Image: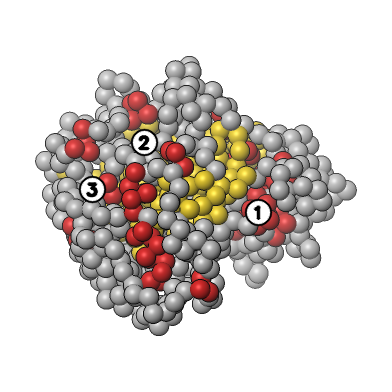
Amino acid sequence: MTRNRPPVPSLKGQDAFKTDKDVSTNQSPCFSEILEARVSRRDTLRGGLGLAATTIFAGAGLSACDSSSSGSSGGTGGGAASLNFQSVPGSSADAVTVADGYETQVLIPWGTPLNGSMPAFTTDGMGSTNSAADQALQIGANHDGMTYFPLSQSAPSDAGLLVVNHEYSNPTLFPGGARTVDSNGAPTVPDEVRKDMNAHGVSVVEIARDANGMVSLVGGSGFNRRITLNTPMRLSGPAAGSEFTVTAYDNSGMTTRGTVNNCGRGFTPWGTYLTCEENIQGYFITTEANPPRSKDRMGMSATGFGYLWRNVAGDPSEVNGEFARFDTTPSGASAMDDYRNESNCFGWIVEIDPFNPDSNPVKRTAMGRFKHEGCEPGRVVDGQPIAFYMGDDERFDYFYKFVTADAYNADRPNPNMLDNGTLYVARFDEDGTGEWLPLTFGEGPLVSPLFSSQADVLVNARSAADALGATPMDRPEWSTTDPNTGEIYLTLTNNTARDPGDENAANPRADNSHGHIIRMAEMDDNPAATGFSWDLFVFGSNANADPSFNLSGLTLDNEFGSPDGLWFDRRGVLWIQTDNGAPLDSDSNDQMLAVIPAELAGDRTVNPDTQASLRRFFVGPAGCEVTGVDMTPDYKTMFVNIQHPGENWPDGGSSVPRSGTVVVRRTDGGEIGLGSNSQTTAQAVSRRDLFKRFA
Ligand code: FEO
Ligand code: CA
Ligand code: CA
């Protein structure tokens, strides 16, 4: 492997992985019991019906585990999965590898001009030489969550809008591959700070597919739009206009500027995109000795990830506190005079209407403020409320759902459905059941003096969930819904900070370097249910790890670590993406795998026959994260995002690495992932039906 430039430093602030592969020595003594409980519940989960009847471990805490119990991974072999490709080997190449019979092209890498030609992406060989104004007209950095919206009824797969998150920025944003900084490492050039802000946010672009399956940006389309840290936005829901969102920018607390650290994504059945604000503590700083819980519980510090944009505050060119707002330390007489509350305007789910380029994005405060990862709806049924499921990506943080107060009306959707409803957080019990605990002011512990209002509960959702006794998880990332069963799947990317004995049934490995995937079924298949059943689906591992760690029997053909992006296509194929994968025996870069859970036998747990069921489809270039995936409604074009490639992808030679979207198609033009005559394809729900536009 050629390394002719140093790896791109990351500002993501995520934890480092444990690097030793011998993970067999630090196991919970209770695996066998947990696994046994999992297997015992398979019939309940198969039907997706209600709570488990089994009480095998009801009332038996982990301390009651008997170390003489025999372990079992359960199941009797994978069923006949009908994925139409074979696993590709792990790869450490600085290139995209995809299954035999498939081909790829690169679309909209960072710096691509929205109008198709100007301002062109320019570099000095180490970093971009474009200006801040240029960047505002170009694709942003570090692609992440993404959704494809068909544009026409007649040819929904040939013309659409691709909406892409841009999570953070690298020093390659600047000439020489470095920010201009002072001796403290803080930026000194206001236009560089503006460029940094313009590289964040979201891109909306129109794309078109030709007869050969090639996809291109429609340069100059009226839909093409950049949403950045400077885009005006509206706050809505219970925290809008509250004492918590008053700033010097808007004394009414109803508006703010921009969105940041846009990580996972969601979508609504009325055709809007949801972008998820994750690590806001990387950007907003405070030097308060005793910051309020709205800052402290979000991990805010005096330095954040080191962006330190407030360092150029007071520059004569500064407009309306555009830099000062990133320091939330109180400095004025009241919240109306400073930016002490600015960070309360971030950490939300933000709804964007991609079909209306003049619309202001809306921050939906009813859905809670935390480090949002994804926001995919459960199964959408006309006449029922909709549940949106949301991970909070932090070690020992929680999994939430928001249930709309209104029932969904497919013919006339209420575009403000996300303003009214109930936010819940999950408690996973050892017997394979669980409870959704409401974050409702006035109920349970969420009363005075702990909380003063629903706005307080929502701004401080993490603190409210703490008080409710939610289950601390191993970094909840994306969740997605099986269209065949309605079950919700959730990635828990990793957590190596649990002390032995601090495991829980849903997070059973103390040293969880490789993460796992859990799934749940709402009681009575009801999105508003307060009870659910749950099961463990697959454990990440390197292939050669001790079986007590490699609990799903992964092989070199499907070993993976740190599952993150997760998406069921409408046929029922589950796509799993990885981030900064813990060490694998194949030394592979990050990747994307596929499995069809509905076609697995037995308890559908991925078992030692996984090669038949879980297959590696795609490996990204060196140093990257694979995150963000969608397909056209005909399943013939797939979009996969490559974030922070570490060497020279995609331009090669000694070029600056650029995040970008990879378009994948079958060389014979057929359906991706499944044969065209497969059962699941026949059951598929067209995205045309899924996305009904409101008038
Ligand atoms: Fe931005 Fe949790 O990944
Ligand atoms: Ca992620
Ligand atoms: Ca991640």
**Which numbered disc covers residue 130?**
none
Q: Give whichever of 539, 644 is nearer the camera.
A: 539
Image coordinates for residue 434, horizontal then vertical, percent: 51, 52
> At x 42% / y 79%, what residue is drawn?
67
> At x 58% / y 62%, what residue is drawn?
305
**Which numbered disc covers residue 148?**
2
For residue 94, above or below residue 659: below
Q: Give whichever of 42, 209 is nearer the camera.
A: 42
Amino acid carrying mark 3 in the image: Glu
Crowd band around label 2 with a 10 angstrom C-alpha radius: few (<14), some (14–19), many (20+): many
Q: Helix, strand, or loop for circle 2? A: strand
Q: Earlier in the sequence, mark 1 or mark 3?
A: 1
**Which numbered disc covers residue 468?**
1
For residue 207, above or below residue 593: above
Image coordinates for residue 620, horizontal then vertical, percent: 30, 58
Amino acid carrying mark 2 in the image: Tyr
Amino acid carrying mark 1 in the image: Leu
Choose top left, top right, bottom left or bottom right for residue 36.
bottom left
Which residue is under mark 3? 599
Could you tell me how far apart the alpha carbons at marks 1 and 2 are, in whole angstroms? 37 Å
Could you tell me how far apart the alpha carbons at marks 3 and 2 are, in whole angstroms? 27 Å
